[in-house]
Each structure stands twice: as structure tokens, then as C-alpha cells.
């Protein structure tokens, strides 16, 4: 899924494109923020309720065959953390795995602080 992307930024762009396709196929209206300084990637109007959506991608498969996604965002040369999903005010977490599996999870049920295992259909 992410083989031809360049770095994590390219991988993230694939994730956002997948989320836009997912919500468009559901018939929802999508808004894209003008910049990337907020803690969400998309705003989706689901049944007249605006939902802030954080998009995450992963290609990390644990030794148990379970995908694991990072629940923090970091950047810069020091890779310092600038926010965690558990502390954000986003409503939904859209996750795209490298095998093309997709998950839409309400943020309030996310239990991990740093990482979250995603159980796949394997």
C-alpha cells in the first residue's frame, strides 16, 4: 500500500486520500483544513454533525500478526511529540494499514497513550 510513497509524509497523504474516498463513498460532506497546524486532518459532516477526524497510517506488523499504530504525532529534526490522540479533541480516528484494511474508531474509546494494536481479520 505504501511501497511507492516517499517517507512518512507520503504515507500520510495516502492515508488522507483513503479517508476522503471512504467518507465520499458513504455520501458524507468532507472539509479539508487550510493548513496542518490543527490536531485533525479532515472535518466530516455525518448526519448534520461535524466530526473532526485524525488520520493515521501503519505498516508495522507485530510478531503476532497484529498491526500497531502510533497514537502520537511528532516532527522536526528532534522528532519531538507535538500531540497525542488521547489528549486531542478530534472525534474520530481513521486508520489505514499497509494491507489496505481501514478502521474508523471513535476517539473516546482509544485506550493507548503511545501505540494501539489493531486486530485485523487474519
Image: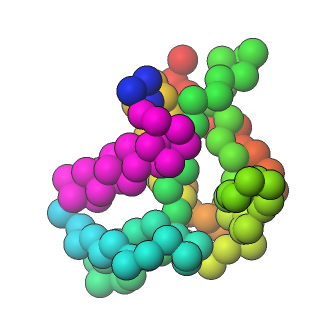
Vertical order, 22 against 98 (above or below):
below
Q: Which of 16/92 is in front? A: 16
Residue at figure coordinates x 44%, y 76% from the top left = 35
Q: Is residue 120 left or right of residue 72?
A: left
Extreme residue toward the front, this view? 77
Q: Quadrant of residue 107?
A: bottom right
> Looking at the rendering, which quadrant does residue 77 occupy?
bottom right
Left/right placement of residue 107 relative to residue 2 reads right
Our reading of the magenta stretch's main secondary structure is helix
Q: Quadrant of the C terminus?
A: top right
**48 in relation to 3, above or below:** below
Residue placed at 53% from the left, 38% from the top? 7
Asked whether, in this view, residue 91 is left or right of residue 84, the answer is left
| Count of marks placed on residues | 0
Q: Is residue 36 visible?
A: yes
The answer to whether residue 46 is seen in the rendering is no
x 47%, y 41%: residue: 11
**Residue 112: x %, y % from top left:** 78, 52
The x and y percentages for residue 66 are 66, 25
Give the residue displayed 73% in from the left and 68% down from the top.
82
Front-most of residues 116 and 75: 75
**The N terminus sits in image quarter:** top left
Residue 53 at what x, y percent from top left?
A: 47, 67
Residue 6 within the segment the image draws in magenta: yes
Q: Position of residue 60 (x, y in %)?
A: 64, 28
What's the colour scheme?
Answer: rainbow
Residue range in magenta is 5-25
Q: Judge whether 122 appears above or below 12 on screen.
A: above
Amino acid at each position: 500500500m505504501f511501497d511507492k510513497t516517499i517517507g512518512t509524509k507520503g504515507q500520510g497523504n495516502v492515508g488522507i486520500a483513503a479517508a476522503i474516498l471512504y467518507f465520499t463513498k458513504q455520501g458524507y460532506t468532507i472539509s479539508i483544513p487550510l493548513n496542518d497546524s490543527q490536531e485533525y486532518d479532515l472535518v466530516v459532516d455525518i448526519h448534520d454533525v461535524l466530526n473532526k477526524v485524525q488520520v493515521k497510517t501503519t505498516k508495522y506488523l507485530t510478531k503476532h500478526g497484529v498491526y500497531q499504530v502510533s497514537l502520537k504525532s511528532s516532527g522536526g529534526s528532534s522528532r519531538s511529540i507535538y500531540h497525542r490522540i488521547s489528549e486531542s479533541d478530534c472525534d474520530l480516528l481513521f486508520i489505514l494499514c499497509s494491507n489496505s484494511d481501514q478502521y474508523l474508531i471513535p476517539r473516546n474509546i482509544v485506550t493507548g497513550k503511545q501505540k494501539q494494536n489493531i486486530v485485523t481479520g487474519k
